[in-house]
């Protein structure tokens, strides 16, 4: 299964039907390296793409499947750890140093298996219990990697996990890494958008709206839910590999409970209704995380309180719109369409 | 209950579309169904009548596999499906509609019907989008026309009227190649004109498709069914031709408020 089949979309793709906003955002993202500094490219945008992809995998099971999973960061974490363990790192006693064409697919495969197994456990529950069981798995994964020194190198984790030098490009370079992340983020985004209208995605939304009826139409509801976790896990796994390359390190702190919940915050702040939501949420989150410190210091507050800013922002957005920034945007557009710009009077809907 | 494949094959295709033997369903101490035995021949059209709480919908839920009976066996076209999950029964030609429409509120009319067509065919996990000229898409369009919903093609189900939702409910049950359909009060909440349309849809179904219909409206039930089972307190207490049932003193007492005790 997996995302590879999306190539068949090309036959139906009509450039004139792509909204202007896509062209504008696409062009802007491609041109960013021309104007932005290395810091902005990597620490702001590449990071946004990576967290956006992990949140996208949550959006897929949550928004289309109605299952809120807190284990998506753990899936990315498994891929990140596998890249470090099977590939090369500074911890020569553990890392196996397999070539890229072996350790990258293996990392994706193992992380997908982990995510699918998590799903197989989680789909036996519903609602708050799904959240609890996936949180439990994420927590268990965090403590396991922190306490296991033989394979996961415990508290310290791995460092100097770097992307391979491939096709004559040094993927460690800021510009190359930016485009690498942009490519996979765009690919994942389009894949989710496409699959949402394919039989698998439609059926998943059917399962979300009405599992009982889906069974009465001949669908194996449980199998569909598990498959949704598998699909989402591939996205999270790719993001996990980029995540370990971004900083060159992976340690238990990166897969702790706090960051796992941050993924949920990102997805909810952005909006779970459309795959662009997680990326919007990720951009807001990364900007807040990066600059809240300076803002707080400048205004004479304790810089360690940046989580407070994020929390307040989260509260404000959820308070005004149950569907994140996307919901706010939609409401604003709906409103502006109904108001005549000249007279200011409300038009008939 | 655990039969061998050989046993199952030997009984497959033997006579009856649906066969229930001694089916009971307990909810705690309450017996929603007790010792129900029904045999329906292929192509037969049966009405199930009874007051509220008589166990009619529970009967349907047991047949579809929404939950398992506490005891007894259910055979579908000769095959023992008692412990089969719902989707396995549906793939064998069983269909049902729901008393309160169970639709996919967030999806459009055509997507709802397309899903129903997809559910009983291959490629349920396909990641390739359907093309407009695909056979299943074609089947979905035809069903949409059959239940007069062409104008609402792209409308989200949550925006449909009650009557339209009931029509869509029926379309979902007709998807694929149904062999036996359970209609749970399809006329509930319909206007007289919509009722006539419903009767027309039911009576014009291909002859080989049998069904059981639960209906409170005697006029509808007796017009679309050739046999009637009367239920009360989880039991079937009378079976017969519509005219026999209509003139039966016991049934009249029940329906005129006397009660069966």
Image (tube, coloured by chain):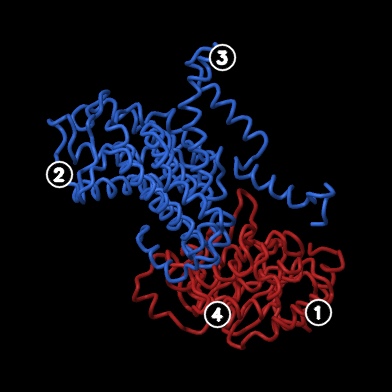
Chain colours: A blue, B red
Say if residue A71 shows up in the picture: no
Residue sitting at x 47%, y 16%:
A304
Q: Position of residue B16 (x, y in %)?
A: 53, 81
Of all residues, the one furthest to the front in this rendering is A35
For residue B48, above or below residue B157? below
Left or right of residue B100, residue B13 in this image = left
Mark 3: secondary structure? loop
Q: For the residues carrying marks 3 and 4, which lies nearer the camera in this image?
A: 3
Q: Residue at x 40, y 42 (%)?
A: A34
Q: Chain of mark 2?
A: A
Choose mark 1 or mark 3, whichever is in front.
Answer: 3
Which residue carries the number 3 mark? Answer: A299
**Do tags 3 and 4 sit on the same chain?**
no
Callout 3 touching callout 4 (CB < 8 Å): no
Residue behind mark 4: B138
Q: Label 2 near label 4: C-beta < 8 Å?
A: no
Query: Mark 1 or mark 4: which comes first in sequence?
Result: 4
Q: CA distance from mark 4 to mark 2?
A: 50 Å
Confirm whether circles 2 and 1 share one chain: no
Q: Quadrant of residue B26?
A: bottom right
Q: Nearer the viewer, residue A7 or A209?
A: A7
A119 or A44, nearer to the observer: A44
Whether discs 1 and 4 lie on one chain: the answer is yes
Tag of residue B246: 1
Can marks 2 and 3 be said to lie on one chain?
yes
> At numbered mark 1, what does the secondary structure look like: helix, strand or loop?
helix
Are the residues under marks 1 and 3 on the same chain? no
Image mark 4: chain: B
10 Å crowding of disc 3: few (<14), some (14-19), many (20+):
few
Q: Secondary structure at mark 2?
A: loop
The residue pinned by badge 2 equals A98
């Amino acid at each position: 299964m997996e995302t590879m089949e999306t190539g068949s979309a090309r036959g139906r793709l009509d450039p004139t039907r792509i909204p202007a906003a896509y062209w504008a955002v696409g062009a802007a993202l491609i041109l960013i390296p021309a104007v932005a500094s290395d810091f902005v490219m990597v620490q702001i945008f590449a990071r946004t793409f990576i967290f956006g992809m992990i949140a996208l995998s949550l959006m897929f099971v949550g928004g289309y499947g109605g299952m809120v999973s807190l284990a998506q960061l753990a899936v990315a974490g498994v891929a990140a750890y596998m890249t470090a363990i099977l590939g090369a790192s500074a911890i020569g006693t553990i890392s196996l140093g397999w070539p890229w064409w072996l350790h990258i697919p293996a990392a994706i495969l193992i992380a997908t298996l982990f995510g699918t197994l998590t799903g197989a456990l989680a789909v036996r529950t519903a609602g708050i219990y799904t959240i609890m069981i996936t949180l439990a798995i994420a927590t268990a994964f965090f403590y396991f990697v922190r306490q296991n020194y033989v394979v996961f190198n415990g508290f310290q984790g791995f460092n100097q996990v770097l992307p391979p030098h491939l096709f004559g490009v040094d993927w460690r370079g800021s510009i190359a890494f930016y485009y690498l992340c942009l490519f996979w983020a765009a690919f994942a985004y389009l894949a989710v958008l496409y699959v949402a209208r394919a039989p698998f995605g439609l059926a998943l939304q059917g399962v979300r709206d009405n599992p009982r009826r889906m069974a009465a139409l001949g669908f194996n509801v449980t199998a569909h839910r598990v498959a949704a976790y598998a699909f989402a896990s591939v996205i999270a796994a790719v993001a996990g590999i980029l995540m370990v390359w971004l900083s060159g390190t992976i340690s238990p702190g990166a897969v702790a409970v706090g960051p796992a919940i941050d993924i949920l915050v990102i997805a909810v702040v952005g909006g779970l209704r459309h795959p662009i939501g997680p990326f919007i949420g990720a951009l807001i989150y990364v900007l807040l995380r990066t600059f809240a410190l300076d803002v707080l210091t400048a205004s004479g507050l304790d810089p360690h309180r940046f989580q407070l800013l994020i929390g307040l922002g989260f509260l404000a957005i959820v308070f005004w719109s149950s569907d994140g920034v996307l919901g706010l945007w939609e409401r604003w557009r709906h409103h502006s369409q109904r108001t005549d710009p000249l007279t200011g009077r409300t038009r008939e809907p | 209950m655990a039969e061998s494949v050989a046993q199952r094959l030997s009984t497959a295709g033997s006579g009856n579309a649906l066969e229930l033997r001694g089916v009971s369903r307990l909810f705690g101490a309450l017996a929603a169904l007790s010792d129900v035995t029904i045999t329906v021949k292929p192509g037969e059209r049966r009405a199930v009548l009874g007051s509220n709480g008589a166990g009619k919908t529970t009967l349907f839920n047991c047949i579809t596999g929404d939950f398992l009976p506490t005891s007894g066996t259910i055979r579908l076209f000769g095959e023992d499906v008692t412990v089969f999950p719902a989707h396995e029964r549906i793939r064998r030609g069983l269909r049902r509609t729901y008393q309160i429409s169970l639709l996919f509120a967030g999806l459009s009319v055509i997507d709802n019907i397309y899903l129903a067509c997809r559910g009983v065919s291959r490629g349920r996990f396909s990641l390739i989008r359907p093309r407009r000229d695909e056979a299943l898409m074609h089947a979905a369009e035809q069903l949409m026309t059959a239940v007069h919903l062409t104008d609402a093609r792209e409308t989200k189900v949550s925006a449909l009227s009650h009557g339209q939702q009931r029509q869509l409910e029926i379309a979902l049950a007709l998807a694929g190649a149904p062999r036996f359909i359970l209609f749970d009060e399809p006329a509930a909440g319909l206007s007289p004109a919509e009722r006539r349309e419903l009767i027309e849809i039911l009576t014009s179904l291909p002859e080989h498709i049998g069904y059981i219909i639960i209906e409170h409206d005697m006029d509808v039930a007796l017009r679309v069914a050739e046999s009637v089972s009367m239920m009360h307190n989880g039991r079937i207490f009378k079976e017969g031709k519509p005219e026999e049932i209509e003139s039966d003193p016991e049934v009249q007492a029940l329906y005129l408020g006397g009660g069966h005790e």
